[in-house]
Image: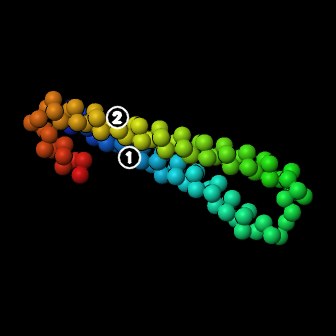
């Protein structure tokens, strides 16, 4: 039975890692939005046609960061769902340690 508790601890450690990846994904997602809002706020100080050679790479980088942020968030959420499912299966299969697992998860 002790190895099942160790398995749940390992799964919880993986879940914490997935939560860290989720935080990173949110931060990566927020970066293009803040850059875009800064550009919109300062747009009266420049002419878009004169700085188009700067804006095109910046917009493509922002799009790449948005895609990467969404990827990290979705991947992290799917992994956390899988970890929760695996913990639930262990709790159902080994009901003796189910209450102990609930204390670990909380």
Q: Is residue 20 left or right of residue 83?
A: right
The residue shown at (78%, 66%) is 43
For label 1, the residue is 16
Q: How many marks overall?
A: 2
* Viewer-closest of 22 and 56: 56
View extreme (top): residue: 93
Number of other residues with Cα within 10 Å of mark 2, as a class: few under 14, some 14 to 19, many 20 or more: some
Q: Quadrant of residue 45?
A: bottom right
Number of other residues with Cα within 10 Å of mark 1, as a class: few under 14, some 14 to 19, many 20 or more: few
Q: How far from the left and from the top, in percent, is residue 50?
A: 90, 58
The residue shown at (18%, 36%) is 91
For label 2, the residue is 82
Measured in 3D between alpha carbons, the distance from the residue under mark 2 to the one under mark 1, in whole angstroms, is 13 Å
Note whether 64 is above or below 36 in the view shown: above
The residue shown at (20%, 32%) is 90
| Colour logic | rainbow
Q: How far from the left and from the top, in percent, is residue 56?
A: 80, 48
Quick check: can you spot residue 4? no
Quick check: can you spot residue 74? yes
Q: How far from the left and from the top, in percent, is residue 27?
A: 55, 54
């Amino acid at each position: 039975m002790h190895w099942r508790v160790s398995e749940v601890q390992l799964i919880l450690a993986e879940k914490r890692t997935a939560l860290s990846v989720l935080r990173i994904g949110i931060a990566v997602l927020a970066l293009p939005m803040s850059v875009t809002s800064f550009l919109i706020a300062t747009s009266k100080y420049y002419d878009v046609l004169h700085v188009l050679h700067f804006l095109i790479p910046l917009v493509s980088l922002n799009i790449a960061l948005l895609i990467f942020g969404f990827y990290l968030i979705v991947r992290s959420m799917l992994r956390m769902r899988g970890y929760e499912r695996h913990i639930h299966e262990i709790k159902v299969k080994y009901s003796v340690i189910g209450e102990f697992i609930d204390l670990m998860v909380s």
